[in-house]
Amino acid sequence: MTTSQSELERKLFLGGRLGRLRRDLGLTQTRMAEDLGVSPSYLNHLERNQRPVTAQILLRLAQTYDLDLRAFSGELDQGAEADLQEALADPLFRGLNVTRHEMLQALEQAPTVAEALVRLYRAYSDRRRRDSLGAGAAEDGVEEIAPHDWVRDYIQAHHNAFSELDALGEALAAEIGGTQGAVPGGFEAAGSRRLAEMHNIQVRLMPADAMPDWSRRFDPHRRQLRLVETLSAPSRAFAVAYQIAWLEQGDALNGLAEGADAPNLATRRTLKIALTNYLAAAMIMPYGAFQPVAEALGYDIGLLAARFGVSFEQACHRLTTLQRPSARGVPFFMLRIDAAGNVSKRFTSIAFPFARMGGACPRWNIHGAFRHPGQIVTQVIETPDKARYFTLARTVERPLRPHGSDAADLAVGLGCEIKYASRLVYARGVNLERATEVGPTCRLCERPACLDRAAPPVSRSLVTDELSKMAAPFRFSEAP
Protein backbone atom coordinates (compact mmCIF):
# COMPACT_ATOMS: atom_id res chain seq x y z
CA MET A 1 0.00 0.00 0.00
CA THR A 2 1.60 3.28 -1.03
CA THR A 3 1.04 6.97 -0.68
CA SER A 4 2.62 9.89 -2.52
CA GLN A 5 5.96 11.37 -1.44
CA SER A 6 4.36 14.77 -0.79
CA GLU A 7 1.82 13.16 1.55
CA LEU A 8 4.63 11.44 3.44
CA GLU A 9 6.70 14.61 3.76
CA ARG A 10 4.04 16.99 5.01
CA LYS A 11 3.26 17.09 8.72
CA LEU A 12 0.11 15.20 9.50
CA PHE A 13 -1.65 15.83 12.78
CA LEU A 14 -4.15 13.00 12.86
CA GLY A 15 -4.62 12.54 16.59
CA GLY A 16 -8.42 12.45 16.46
CA ARG A 17 -8.48 9.85 13.70
CA LEU A 18 -5.78 7.76 15.38
CA GLY A 19 -7.64 7.75 18.69
CA ARG A 20 -10.90 6.83 17.01
CA LEU A 21 -9.23 4.00 15.06
CA ARG A 22 -7.82 2.61 18.31
CA ARG A 23 -11.22 2.74 20.01
CA ASP A 24 -12.93 1.16 16.99
CA LEU A 25 -10.42 -1.69 17.19
CA GLY A 26 -11.03 -2.05 20.93
CA LEU A 27 -7.37 -1.47 21.81
CA THR A 28 -5.74 0.25 24.75
CA GLN A 29 -2.97 2.75 24.12
CA THR A 30 -0.50 0.25 25.56
CA ARG A 31 -1.62 -2.51 23.16
CA MET A 32 -1.60 -0.28 20.08
CA ALA A 33 1.82 1.09 21.08
CA GLU A 34 3.12 -2.49 21.22
CA ASP A 35 1.63 -3.24 17.81
CA LEU A 36 3.30 -0.18 16.30
CA GLY A 37 6.62 -0.61 18.12
CA VAL A 38 6.45 2.73 19.95
CA SER A 39 6.10 3.75 23.58
CA PRO A 40 2.66 4.42 25.10
CA SER A 41 3.74 7.98 25.89
CA TYR A 42 4.68 8.61 22.25
CA LEU A 43 1.33 7.25 21.09
CA ASN A 44 -0.37 9.50 23.63
CA HIS A 45 1.46 12.50 22.14
CA LEU A 46 0.29 11.48 18.65
CA GLU A 47 -3.34 11.21 19.75
CA ARG A 48 -3.17 14.61 21.48
CA ASN A 49 -1.67 16.19 18.31
CA GLN A 50 1.46 17.11 20.22
CA ARG A 51 3.47 15.34 17.53
CA PRO A 52 2.72 14.70 13.85
CA VAL A 53 2.07 11.22 12.54
CA THR A 54 5.19 10.27 10.60
CA ALA A 55 5.44 8.33 7.36
CA GLN A 56 6.88 5.39 9.31
CA ILE A 57 3.89 5.31 11.67
CA LEU A 58 1.48 5.56 8.73
CA LEU A 59 3.09 2.58 7.04
CA ARG A 60 3.06 0.57 10.26
CA LEU A 61 -0.64 1.37 10.69
CA ALA A 62 -1.32 0.18 7.14
CA GLN A 63 0.63 -3.06 7.58
CA THR A 64 -0.60 -3.86 11.09
CA TYR A 65 -4.30 -3.10 10.70
CA ASP A 66 -4.73 -3.49 6.92
CA LEU A 67 -5.54 0.20 6.76
CA ASP A 68 -6.24 2.25 3.64
CA LEU A 69 -3.88 5.21 3.95
CA ARG A 70 -5.90 7.22 1.42
CA ALA A 71 -8.94 7.08 3.66
CA PHE A 72 -7.05 7.53 6.93
CA SER A 73 -4.78 10.44 6.00
CA GLY A 74 -6.90 12.01 3.28
CA GLU A 75 -9.43 14.81 3.43
CA LEU A 76 -12.23 14.85 5.96
CA ASP A 77 -15.50 13.13 5.12
CA GLN A 78 -17.58 15.81 3.42
CA GLY A 79 -20.72 14.03 4.54
CA ALA A 80 -19.70 14.46 8.18
CA GLU A 81 -18.79 18.07 7.46
CA ALA A 82 -22.17 18.71 5.84
CA ASP A 83 -23.98 17.10 8.79
CA LEU A 84 -22.16 19.27 11.32
CA GLN A 85 -22.58 22.37 9.16
CA GLU A 86 -26.31 21.73 8.92
CA ALA A 87 -26.59 21.35 12.69
CA LEU A 88 -24.59 24.50 13.46
CA ALA A 89 -26.53 26.50 10.86
CA ASP A 90 -29.73 26.10 12.87
CA PRO A 91 -31.04 29.40 14.28
CA LEU A 92 -30.62 27.79 17.69
CA PHE A 93 -26.88 28.50 17.38
CA ARG A 94 -27.21 31.99 15.91
CA GLY A 95 -24.76 34.36 17.53
CA LEU A 96 -22.08 31.76 18.17
CA ASN A 97 -20.55 32.46 14.74
CA VAL A 98 -18.74 29.14 14.53
CA THR A 99 -16.21 29.48 11.73
CA ARG A 100 -15.50 26.76 9.20
CA HIS A 101 -11.97 26.53 10.59
CA GLU A 102 -13.35 25.79 14.06
CA MET A 103 -15.77 23.25 12.63
CA LEU A 104 -12.99 21.45 10.76
CA GLN A 105 -10.86 21.47 13.89
CA ALA A 106 -13.64 19.73 15.78
CA LEU A 107 -14.02 17.11 13.05
CA GLU A 108 -10.27 16.55 12.91
CA GLN A 109 -9.37 16.62 16.59
CA ALA A 110 -12.57 15.43 18.26
CA PRO A 111 -14.56 13.48 15.65
CA THR A 112 -16.53 11.53 18.26
CA VAL A 113 -17.65 14.73 19.98
CA ALA A 114 -18.67 16.17 16.59
CA GLU A 115 -20.67 13.04 15.81
CA ALA A 116 -22.31 13.22 19.24
CA LEU A 117 -23.36 16.81 18.54
CA VAL A 118 -24.90 15.81 15.21
CA ARG A 119 -26.80 12.92 16.83
CA LEU A 120 -28.09 15.20 19.55
CA TYR A 121 -29.17 17.77 16.98
CA ARG A 122 -31.01 15.11 14.98
CA ALA A 123 -32.86 13.96 18.08
CA TYR A 124 -33.72 17.58 18.86
CA SER A 125 -34.92 18.17 15.29
CA ASP A 126 -37.06 15.04 15.36
CA ARG A 127 -38.62 16.13 18.66
CA ARG A 128 -39.26 19.61 17.33
CA ARG A 129 -40.87 18.20 14.19
CA ARG A 130 -43.09 15.86 16.22
CA ASP A 131 -44.13 18.68 18.52
CA SER A 132 -45.06 20.82 15.53
CA LEU A 133 -47.32 18.00 14.33
CA GLY A 134 -48.85 17.53 17.75
CA ALA A 135 -47.20 14.16 18.31
CA GLY A 136 -46.29 13.07 21.79
CA ALA A 137 -42.89 12.18 23.15
CA ALA A 138 -41.62 8.68 23.68
CA GLU A 139 -42.92 6.95 26.79
CA ASP A 140 -39.58 7.03 28.56
CA GLY A 141 -39.00 10.66 27.63
CA VAL A 142 -36.18 9.81 25.19
CA GLU A 143 -36.57 10.46 21.49
CA GLU A 144 -35.35 7.66 19.25
CA ILE A 145 -33.92 7.96 15.77
CA ALA A 146 -36.18 6.45 13.11
CA PRO A 147 -35.06 2.87 12.31
CA HIS A 148 -34.20 3.57 8.66
CA ASP A 149 -32.18 6.68 9.62
CA TRP A 150 -30.27 4.73 12.27
CA VAL A 151 -29.51 1.91 9.84
CA ARG A 152 -28.43 4.37 7.15
CA ASP A 153 -25.98 5.97 9.57
CA TYR A 154 -24.71 2.56 10.72
CA ILE A 155 -24.04 1.43 7.15
CA GLN A 156 -22.37 4.75 6.37
CA ALA A 157 -20.14 4.40 9.45
CA HIS A 158 -18.94 1.09 7.94
CA HIS A 159 -18.34 2.79 4.55
CA ASN A 160 -21.01 0.55 3.05
CA ALA A 161 -18.69 -2.47 3.11
CA PHE A 162 -18.97 -5.64 5.21
CA SER A 163 -16.05 -7.97 4.52
CA GLU A 164 -17.54 -10.92 6.42
CA LEU A 165 -20.67 -10.82 4.26
CA ASP A 166 -18.57 -10.56 1.10
CA ALA A 167 -16.71 -13.71 2.15
CA LEU A 168 -19.97 -15.52 2.94
CA GLY A 169 -21.43 -14.44 -0.39
CA GLU A 170 -18.46 -15.82 -2.30
CA ALA A 171 -18.67 -19.15 -0.48
CA LEU A 172 -22.40 -19.51 -1.14
CA ALA A 173 -22.01 -18.46 -4.77
CA ALA A 174 -19.35 -21.14 -5.29
CA GLU A 175 -21.73 -23.78 -3.86
CA ILE A 176 -24.81 -22.64 -5.76
CA GLY A 177 -23.34 -21.56 -9.10
CA GLY A 178 -25.41 -19.62 -11.61
CA THR A 179 -23.26 -16.50 -11.84
CA GLN A 180 -21.80 -15.26 -15.13
CA GLY A 181 -23.94 -17.67 -17.10
CA ALA A 182 -22.35 -20.76 -15.53
CA VAL A 183 -25.77 -22.43 -15.17
CA PRO A 184 -28.66 -22.21 -17.68
CA GLY A 185 -31.15 -19.71 -16.32
CA GLY A 186 -28.55 -18.03 -14.15
CA PHE A 187 -28.77 -17.59 -10.41
CA GLU A 188 -32.56 -17.68 -10.29
CA ALA A 189 -32.64 -21.26 -11.58
CA ALA A 190 -29.67 -22.44 -9.52
CA GLY A 191 -30.96 -20.79 -6.36
CA SER A 192 -34.47 -22.16 -6.88
CA ARG A 193 -33.04 -25.67 -7.12
CA ARG A 194 -31.13 -25.16 -3.90
CA LEU A 195 -34.28 -23.99 -2.11
CA ALA A 196 -36.15 -27.06 -3.37
CA GLU A 197 -33.44 -29.63 -2.70
CA MET A 198 -32.06 -28.35 0.62
CA HIS A 199 -35.09 -26.66 2.17
CA ASN A 200 -38.10 -28.20 0.43
CA ILE A 201 -39.23 -24.73 -0.65
CA GLN A 202 -40.83 -24.14 -4.03
CA VAL A 203 -40.59 -20.82 -5.87
CA ARG A 204 -43.96 -19.85 -7.35
CA LEU A 205 -44.82 -16.98 -9.66
CA MET A 206 -48.15 -15.49 -8.64
CA PRO A 207 -50.63 -13.46 -10.71
CA ALA A 208 -50.50 -9.74 -10.04
CA ASP A 209 -54.11 -9.67 -8.90
CA ALA A 210 -53.34 -12.38 -6.31
CA MET A 211 -50.50 -10.31 -4.80
CA PRO A 212 -51.56 -6.69 -5.41
CA ASP A 213 -49.60 -5.32 -2.44
CA TRP A 214 -46.55 -7.60 -2.41
CA SER A 215 -43.59 -8.36 -4.62
CA ARG A 216 -42.27 -11.23 -2.50
CA ARG A 217 -43.78 -13.32 0.31
CA PHE A 218 -42.48 -16.41 2.06
CA ASP A 219 -45.12 -18.85 3.30
CA PRO A 220 -43.37 -21.10 5.87
CA HIS A 221 -46.43 -23.36 6.26
CA ARG A 222 -46.82 -24.19 2.58
CA ARG A 223 -43.04 -24.01 2.06
CA GLN A 224 -43.41 -21.56 -0.79
CA LEU A 225 -41.56 -18.44 -1.87
CA ARG A 226 -44.15 -16.46 -3.77
CA LEU A 227 -43.03 -13.87 -6.29
CA VAL A 228 -45.37 -11.59 -8.19
CA GLU A 229 -45.31 -12.20 -11.94
CA THR A 230 -44.43 -8.59 -12.77
CA LEU A 231 -40.97 -8.85 -11.18
CA SER A 232 -38.08 -8.63 -13.64
CA ALA A 233 -35.63 -11.54 -13.93
CA PRO A 234 -32.93 -9.72 -11.88
CA SER A 235 -35.48 -8.96 -9.15
CA ARG A 236 -36.60 -12.59 -9.05
CA ALA A 237 -33.00 -13.77 -8.76
CA PHE A 238 -32.40 -11.29 -5.95
CA ALA A 239 -35.52 -12.50 -4.11
CA VAL A 240 -34.26 -16.08 -4.32
CA ALA A 241 -30.81 -15.04 -3.07
CA TYR A 242 -32.39 -13.13 -0.19
CA GLN A 243 -34.37 -16.21 0.86
CA ILE A 244 -31.28 -18.42 0.79
CA ALA A 245 -29.30 -15.88 2.82
CA TRP A 246 -32.11 -15.60 5.38
CA LEU A 247 -32.45 -19.37 5.74
CA GLU A 248 -28.82 -20.42 5.72
CA GLN A 249 -27.00 -17.52 7.33
CA GLY A 250 -29.56 -16.42 9.90
CA ASP A 251 -27.19 -16.91 12.84
CA ALA A 252 -24.44 -14.83 11.23
CA LEU A 253 -26.88 -12.08 10.25
CA ASN A 254 -28.48 -12.07 13.70
CA GLY A 255 -25.04 -11.84 15.27
CA LEU A 256 -24.11 -8.80 13.20
CA ALA A 257 -27.44 -7.13 13.92
CA GLU A 258 -27.21 -7.87 17.65
CA GLY A 259 -23.61 -6.66 17.80
CA ALA A 260 -24.56 -3.31 16.28
CA ASP A 261 -26.27 -2.27 19.52
CA ALA A 262 -29.39 -1.01 17.76
CA PRO A 263 -31.68 1.02 20.04
CA ASN A 264 -34.82 -1.15 19.64
CA LEU A 265 -36.31 -4.23 18.02
CA ALA A 266 -37.64 -2.40 14.96
CA THR A 267 -34.21 -0.93 14.22
CA ARG A 268 -32.51 -4.28 14.77
CA ARG A 269 -34.88 -5.96 12.31
CA THR A 270 -34.42 -3.18 9.78
CA LEU A 271 -30.66 -3.60 10.05
CA LYS A 272 -30.95 -7.37 9.57
CA ILE A 273 -32.97 -6.82 6.39
CA ALA A 274 -30.30 -4.42 5.09
CA LEU A 275 -27.51 -6.91 5.89
CA THR A 276 -29.47 -9.76 4.28
CA ASN A 277 -29.87 -7.64 1.15
CA TYR A 278 -26.10 -7.02 1.19
CA LEU A 279 -25.42 -10.76 1.44
CA ALA A 280 -27.87 -11.50 -1.39
CA ALA A 281 -26.01 -9.06 -3.65
CA ALA A 282 -22.69 -10.60 -2.59
CA MET A 283 -24.00 -14.02 -3.69
CA ILE A 284 -25.18 -12.88 -7.13
CA MET A 285 -22.17 -10.60 -7.67
CA PRO A 286 -19.33 -12.32 -5.73
CA TYR A 287 -16.59 -9.87 -4.87
CA GLY A 288 -13.72 -11.90 -6.34
CA ALA A 289 -15.54 -12.22 -9.66
CA PHE A 290 -17.30 -8.86 -9.81
CA GLN A 291 -14.48 -6.43 -8.93
CA PRO A 292 -11.93 -7.51 -11.58
CA VAL A 293 -14.62 -7.69 -14.26
CA ALA A 294 -15.83 -4.20 -13.33
CA GLU A 295 -12.27 -2.90 -13.63
CA ALA A 296 -11.63 -4.68 -16.92
CA LEU A 297 -14.87 -3.33 -18.42
CA GLY A 298 -14.10 0.23 -17.36
CA TYR A 299 -17.10 0.12 -15.03
CA ASP A 300 -19.50 -0.19 -17.95
CA ILE A 301 -22.65 -0.75 -15.90
CA GLY A 302 -24.71 -2.06 -18.81
CA LEU A 303 -22.14 -4.76 -19.57
CA LEU A 304 -21.73 -5.58 -15.88
CA ALA A 305 -25.48 -5.96 -15.51
CA ALA A 306 -25.63 -8.28 -18.54
CA ARG A 307 -22.64 -10.32 -17.40
CA PHE A 308 -24.05 -11.02 -13.94
CA GLY A 309 -27.75 -11.05 -14.79
CA VAL A 310 -28.57 -8.07 -12.57
CA SER A 311 -30.33 -4.76 -13.05
CA PHE A 312 -28.65 -1.41 -13.63
CA GLU A 313 -29.53 -0.33 -10.09
CA GLN A 314 -28.27 -3.57 -8.53
CA ALA A 315 -24.93 -3.18 -10.32
CA CYS A 316 -24.65 0.46 -9.19
CA HIS A 317 -25.36 -0.50 -5.59
CA ARG A 318 -22.72 -3.24 -5.66
CA LEU A 319 -20.16 -0.82 -7.07
CA THR A 320 -20.42 1.29 -3.89
CA THR A 321 -19.24 -1.67 -1.76
CA LEU A 322 -15.93 -2.58 -3.44
CA GLN A 323 -13.54 -1.64 -0.65
CA ARG A 324 -11.62 -4.87 0.01
CA PRO A 325 -8.05 -3.71 0.83
CA SER A 326 -6.43 -6.27 -1.48
CA ALA A 327 -8.74 -5.48 -4.42
CA ARG A 328 -10.29 -2.04 -4.17
CA GLY A 329 -12.64 -0.77 -6.80
CA VAL A 330 -13.34 2.87 -7.64
CA PRO A 331 -14.95 4.42 -4.52
CA PHE A 332 -18.45 5.50 -5.56
CA PHE A 333 -21.41 7.23 -3.97
CA MET A 334 -24.95 6.48 -5.11
CA LEU A 335 -28.26 8.27 -4.79
CA ARG A 336 -31.75 7.27 -5.92
CA ILE A 337 -34.57 9.81 -6.25
CA ASP A 338 -38.08 10.04 -7.62
CA ALA A 339 -39.34 12.71 -10.00
CA ALA A 340 -40.15 15.00 -7.06
CA GLY A 341 -36.57 14.79 -5.77
CA ASN A 342 -37.35 12.61 -2.77
CA VAL A 343 -34.30 10.51 -1.83
CA SER A 344 -35.04 6.81 -1.29
CA LYS A 345 -31.47 5.45 -1.29
CA ARG A 346 -28.07 6.82 -0.31
CA PHE A 347 -24.97 4.65 -0.32
CA THR A 348 -21.35 5.71 -0.30
CA SER A 349 -17.89 4.38 0.36
CA ILE A 350 -16.34 7.87 0.26
CA ALA A 351 -17.00 11.45 1.27
CA PHE A 352 -20.54 12.34 0.17
CA PRO A 353 -20.83 15.70 -1.63
CA PHE A 354 -24.45 16.27 -0.61
CA ALA A 355 -26.05 16.69 2.80
CA ARG A 356 -27.17 13.33 4.15
CA MET A 357 -30.12 15.00 5.89
CA GLY A 358 -31.48 16.70 2.78
CA GLY A 359 -32.00 16.27 -0.95
CA ALA A 360 -29.53 16.66 -3.79
CA CYS A 361 -28.63 19.99 -5.38
CA PRO A 362 -31.03 20.82 -8.25
CA ARG A 363 -28.03 21.65 -10.43
CA TRP A 364 -26.88 18.01 -10.40
CA ASN A 365 -28.16 16.34 -13.55
CA ILE A 366 -29.60 13.33 -11.73
CA HIS A 367 -32.77 15.42 -11.93
CA GLY A 368 -32.28 15.92 -15.67
CA ALA A 369 -32.14 12.16 -16.22
CA PHE A 370 -35.94 12.14 -16.21
CA ARG A 371 -35.86 14.15 -19.45
CA HIS A 372 -33.85 11.36 -21.14
CA PRO A 373 -35.38 8.07 -19.96
CA GLY A 374 -33.04 5.11 -20.19
CA GLN A 375 -30.06 7.21 -21.28
CA ILE A 376 -26.91 7.78 -19.24
CA VAL A 377 -26.10 11.45 -18.69
CA THR A 378 -22.71 12.50 -17.34
CA GLN A 379 -21.52 15.60 -15.53
CA VAL A 380 -18.52 16.95 -13.67
CA ILE A 381 -19.59 18.74 -10.50
CA GLU A 382 -17.66 21.01 -8.15
CA THR A 383 -18.58 21.49 -4.50
CA PRO A 384 -18.05 24.74 -2.56
CA ASP A 385 -14.67 23.51 -1.26
CA LYS A 386 -13.53 23.07 -4.90
CA ALA A 387 -13.61 19.26 -4.78
CA ARG A 388 -14.63 17.76 -8.12
CA TYR A 389 -16.56 14.59 -8.90
CA PHE A 390 -17.40 12.74 -12.08
CA THR A 391 -21.03 11.63 -12.04
CA LEU A 392 -23.45 9.71 -14.20
CA ALA A 393 -27.20 9.26 -13.89
CA ARG A 394 -29.94 7.21 -15.52
CA THR A 395 -33.58 6.47 -14.97
CA VAL A 396 -34.59 3.00 -13.80
CA GLU A 397 -38.02 1.44 -14.03
CA ARG A 398 -40.08 0.43 -11.06
CA PRO A 399 -41.45 -3.14 -11.11
CA LEU A 400 -44.14 -3.56 -13.76
CA ARG A 401 -47.61 -2.80 -12.51
CA PRO A 402 -51.13 -3.40 -13.86
CA HIS A 403 -52.55 -0.91 -16.32
CA GLY A 404 -53.80 2.27 -14.66
CA SER A 405 -51.47 2.18 -11.66
CA ASP A 406 -48.77 4.74 -11.00
CA ALA A 407 -45.46 3.40 -12.34
CA ALA A 408 -43.28 6.52 -12.48
CA ASP A 409 -39.57 5.93 -13.06
CA LEU A 410 -36.82 6.57 -10.54
CA ALA A 411 -33.36 8.01 -11.23
CA VAL A 412 -30.07 6.59 -9.98
CA GLY A 413 -26.97 8.75 -9.72
CA LEU A 414 -23.43 7.42 -9.31
CA GLY A 415 -20.29 9.45 -8.73
CA CYS A 416 -16.62 9.31 -7.81
CA GLU A 417 -13.79 11.73 -7.17
CA ILE A 418 -12.46 13.24 -10.39
CA LYS A 419 -9.09 11.49 -9.96
CA TYR A 420 -10.78 8.14 -10.68
CA ALA A 421 -12.62 9.30 -13.80
CA SER A 422 -9.97 7.96 -16.18
CA ARG A 423 -10.89 4.41 -15.12
CA LEU A 424 -14.50 4.85 -16.30
CA VAL A 425 -15.62 4.35 -19.89
CA TYR A 426 -18.20 7.09 -19.39
CA ALA A 427 -15.48 9.73 -18.97
CA ARG A 428 -13.89 9.11 -22.36
CA GLY A 429 -14.21 12.20 -24.50
CA VAL A 430 -15.68 14.24 -21.64
CA ASN A 431 -14.07 17.60 -20.82
CA LEU A 432 -13.13 16.99 -17.18
CA GLU A 433 -12.06 20.61 -16.75
CA ARG A 434 -15.59 21.92 -17.23
CA ALA A 435 -17.53 21.58 -14.00
CA THR A 436 -20.96 22.60 -12.75
CA GLU A 437 -20.94 24.24 -9.34
CA VAL A 438 -23.27 22.47 -6.91
CA GLY A 439 -24.03 22.74 -3.23
CA PRO A 440 -24.81 20.22 -0.48
CA THR A 441 -28.50 21.19 -0.37
CA CYS A 442 -30.23 24.56 -0.80
CA ARG A 443 -30.61 25.31 2.91
CA LEU A 444 -26.86 24.80 3.44
CA CYS A 445 -25.54 26.31 0.22
CA GLU A 446 -24.31 29.90 0.50
CA ARG A 447 -23.61 30.51 -3.19
CA PRO A 448 -25.22 33.84 -4.12
CA ALA A 449 -27.38 34.48 -7.19
CA CYS A 450 -28.17 30.82 -7.84
CA LEU A 451 -31.09 30.69 -10.26
CA ASP A 452 -31.96 27.13 -9.21
CA ARG A 453 -32.14 27.77 -5.48
CA ALA A 454 -35.30 26.41 -3.82
CA ALA A 455 -34.72 27.99 -0.38
CA PRO A 456 -32.39 30.53 1.23
CA PRO A 457 -29.51 29.24 3.39
CA VAL A 458 -30.38 28.90 7.07
CA SER A 459 -27.03 30.48 7.97
CA ARG A 460 -27.85 33.83 6.30
CA SER A 461 -30.47 36.50 6.89
CA LEU A 462 -33.02 37.00 4.13
CA VAL A 463 -32.87 40.43 2.49
CA THR A 464 -36.15 41.83 1.12
CA ASP A 465 -36.64 44.78 -1.20
CA GLU A 466 -40.12 45.97 -2.16
CA LEU A 467 -38.84 48.09 -5.07
CA SER A 468 -36.70 45.59 -6.97
CA LYS A 469 -36.41 41.93 -7.78
CA MET A 470 -33.32 39.91 -8.57
CA ALA A 471 -33.15 37.16 -11.18
CA ALA A 472 -32.30 34.72 -8.39
CA PRO A 473 -35.30 33.74 -6.24
CA PHE A 474 -33.67 34.77 -2.93
CA ARG A 475 -31.36 37.50 -1.76
CA PHE A 476 -29.54 37.09 1.54
CA SER A 477 -26.87 38.75 3.62
CA GLU A 478 -23.19 38.08 2.99
CA ALA A 479 -22.43 37.53 6.67
CA PRO A 480 -24.30 35.41 9.27
Image (cartoon, grey):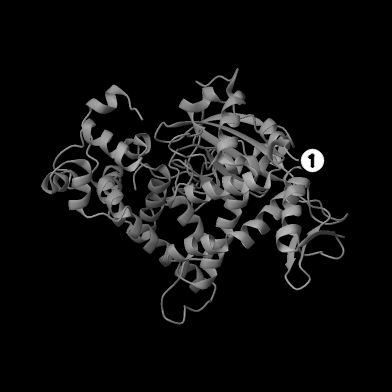
Label 1 sits on a secondary structure element that is loop
Q: Residue at x 74, y 48 (%)?
A: 190
Residue 260 x %, y %: 44, 62
**Residue 99 horizontal side relative to residue 373, left or right:** left
**Residue 30 horizontal side relative to residue 64, left or right:** left
Kind of residue at badge 1:
Pro
- Which corner quadrant of the image does residue 295 belong to? top right
Q: Does any portion of residue 279 appear in the rendered image?
A: yes
Between 124 and 192, the residue placed more toward the observer is 192
Q: Residue at x 62, y 57 (%)?
A: 245
Residue 2 x %, y %: 34, 27
Q: Residue at x 50, y 68 (%)?
A: 129
Reply above or below: 347 against 378: below
Reply above or below: 208 against 466: below
- Which corner quadrant of the image does residue 413 belong to? top right
Q: Quadrant of the N terminus?
A: top left
Sort mark 1 into few (<14), some (14-19) or many (20+) by Cα contacts within 10 Å: few
- Which corner quadrant of the image does residue 96 belong to? bottom left
Q: How many marks?
A: 1
Q: Kindly give the residue lying farthest to the bottom in the view shown.
A: 139
Residue linked to disc 1: 184
Q: Does any portion of residue 162 appear in the rendered image?
A: no
Between 96 and 354, the residue placed more toward the observer is 354
Between 58 and 401, the residue placed more toward the observer is 58
**Residue 325 horizontal side relative to residue 280, left or right:** left
